[in-house]
């Protein structure tokens, strides 16, 4: 073995030892830390205020009627076309006869929530729809209402989002008191 080869071997051995040292140092530091595991089903998860998860349909809080008027705006704006709505015309107002949502193909883009004039479709603070059967992710009107009653609604509803995206309103000038200083 020549002197050149032995220097290369020693250099590579030193680099390998340094890499092992760095890796073991990180492992040892993390071994002493408190685990960050959340025991999900047993311990409820805390969601941020603006978390947006599952879609749901809502009822009017005062009258108890469903908010959806069957206008089909959500169906028209949906990019993957996973929402299907049929309108039922009534004397007082219109209702959605059927409302289906294919959750397995939903992009969660929130466009349906933004265009809804009555805030009938909202996003909830949950993601608990894991299943092995795709047919369970085909949600009808009754299941969407049940999701709306089971979980807390997200901060972002259609009206709040539209207000947030609108240009800021000009504040009215405060009338100055006559006579200068108070």
Image (tube, rainbow, N blue to C red):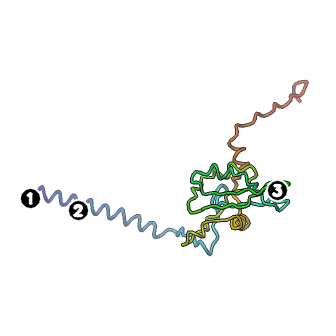
Residue 153 versus residue 5: which sits nearer the camera? 153
Sooner in the amino-acid sequence: mark 2 or mark 1: 1
Left/right of residue 23 with respect to residue 35 in the rendered view: left
Please name the residue that numbered disc 1 is placed on.
2
Callout 1 secondary element: loop
- Residue 13's label in the rendered image is 2
Callout 2 secondary element: helix
Image coords of residue 88 (percent x, y) = 76, 57
Residue 79 versus residue 92: which sits nearer the camera? 92
Q: Is residue 167 above or below residue 77?
A: above
Decide: few, some or many residues near mark 2? Use Cα within 10 Å; few <14, some 14-19, many ≥20: few
Q: Going by the picture, which residue comes out furthest to the top?
A: 179
Mark 1 → mark 3, Cα distance in angstroms: 96 Å
Image coords of residue 156 (percent x, y) = 69, 53
Decide: few, some or many residues near mark 3? Use Cα within 10 Å; few <14, some 14-19, many ≥20: few
Q: Which residue does the image show at 89% across and 28% down from the upper left?
A: 177
Q: Are marks 2 and 3 in contact (CB under 8 Å)?
A: no
Q: Picture quarter containing residue 17? A: bottom left
Residue 33 versus residue 36: which sits nearer the camera? 36
């Amino acid at each position: 073995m020549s002197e050149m080869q032995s220097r290369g071997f020693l250099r590579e051995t030193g680099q390998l030892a340094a890499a092992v040292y760095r890796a073991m140092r990180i492992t040892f530091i993390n071994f002493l830390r408190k685990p960050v595991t959340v025991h999900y089903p047993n311990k409820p998860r805390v969601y941020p205020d603006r978390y947006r998860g599952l879609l749901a349909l809502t009822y009017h809080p005062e009258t108890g009627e469903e908010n959806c008027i069957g206008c089909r705006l959500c169906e028209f704006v949906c990019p993957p076309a996973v929402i299907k709505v049929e309108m039922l015309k009534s004397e007082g107002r219109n209702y959605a006869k059927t409302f289906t949502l294919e959750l397995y193909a939903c992009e969660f883009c929130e466009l349906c929530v933004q265009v809804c004039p009555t805030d009938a479709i909202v996003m909830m603070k949950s993601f608990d729809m894991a299943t092995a059967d795709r047919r369970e992710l085909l949600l009808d009107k009754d299941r969407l209402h049940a999701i709306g009653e089971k979980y807390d609604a997200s901060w972002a509803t259609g009206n709040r989002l539209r207000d947030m995206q609108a240009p800021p309103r000009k504040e009215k000038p405060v009338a100055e008191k006559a006579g200068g200083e108070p």
